[in-house]
Image: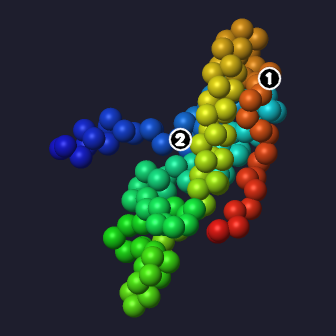
Amino acid sequence: MVSDIFEALIKGMDARVKVERLRKITKNGPIKIGPMLKCRLEAFEKESIPIRNKIAHNSVIKHPTGDIFYFTDIVRMPFSALGFPGFVGPQADHVSGLRLYEHGLWLNLFSHDIIGALERGTHDGMLEIVRPRSSERTAFPVDPSG
């Protein structure tokens, strides 16, 4: 019973679902997605949603001396990286602090772009970014730490 209520409350809250719904609404409707917004939505789906999910669904541990953050759970721990080589198991995913900062900065700038596109879209039928703050890259730079 409680799980049914909880599922009803959170249904559709995933960012990927929201992007899919936006695309579905604009596919045959009176409002269209412009090319600048489209490439940023693709970058959001490809890079930002996965890292958001790692942060939301794992414990995040910073390396005590390095600029690396680990996404851990009960099974995946960075034992060897933290100086416990005797423990075995799947390694925790990780990201550098710089890359994590870049994602956060890009998301902040992209949120301003989305607000502008939504405000403009109600006037001319096009969801588009006119003066972008976020970059149009569809792939983030390679992170040397993995």
Left or right side of 13 for 107: right
Q: Quadrant of the N terminus?
A: top left
Q: Position of residue 143 (x, y in %)?
A: 69, 62
Q: Could you classify mark 2 by the number of other residues whose Cα lies within 10 Å: few (under 14), some (14-19), or many (20 or more)?
A: some
Q: Is residue 139 rendered to the left or right of residue 108?
A: right
Considering every residue shown, the one lying at the far front of the view is 65
Percent across and percent down for residue 66 are 55, 66
Toward the bottom, the furthest residue is 86
Decide: is 101 above or below 125.
below
Q: Is residue 125 left or right of residue 15?
A: right
How many numbered marks appear?
2
Residue holding disc 2: 15
In the depicted structure, whether residue 69 falls above or below residue 15: below
Q: Are marks 2 and 1 in contact (CB under 8 Å)?
A: no
Q: Measuring 72% from the left and 8% from the top, which residue is drawn there?
A: 123
User: Badge 1, how many Cα within 10 Å: few under 14, some, many 20+?
Assistant: few
Q: At x 53% / y 41%, what residue is drawn?
A: 15
The answer to whether residue 78 is above or below residue 136 is below
Secondary structure, mark 1, is loop
Image location (x, y in percent) of residue 31? 71, 20
| Relative to 14, residue 88 above or below | below
Kindly state the secondary structure of the residue where label 2 is placed: helix
Residue in view at x 56 percent, y 44 percent: 16
- Name the mark on residue 131: 1
Residue 61: assigned label: none
Q: Earlier in the sequence, mark 2 or mark 1?
A: 2
> Of circles 2 and 1, which is in front?
1
> Can you say which quadrant of the picture contains the C terminus?
bottom right
Q: Which residue type does callout 2 highlight? A: Ala
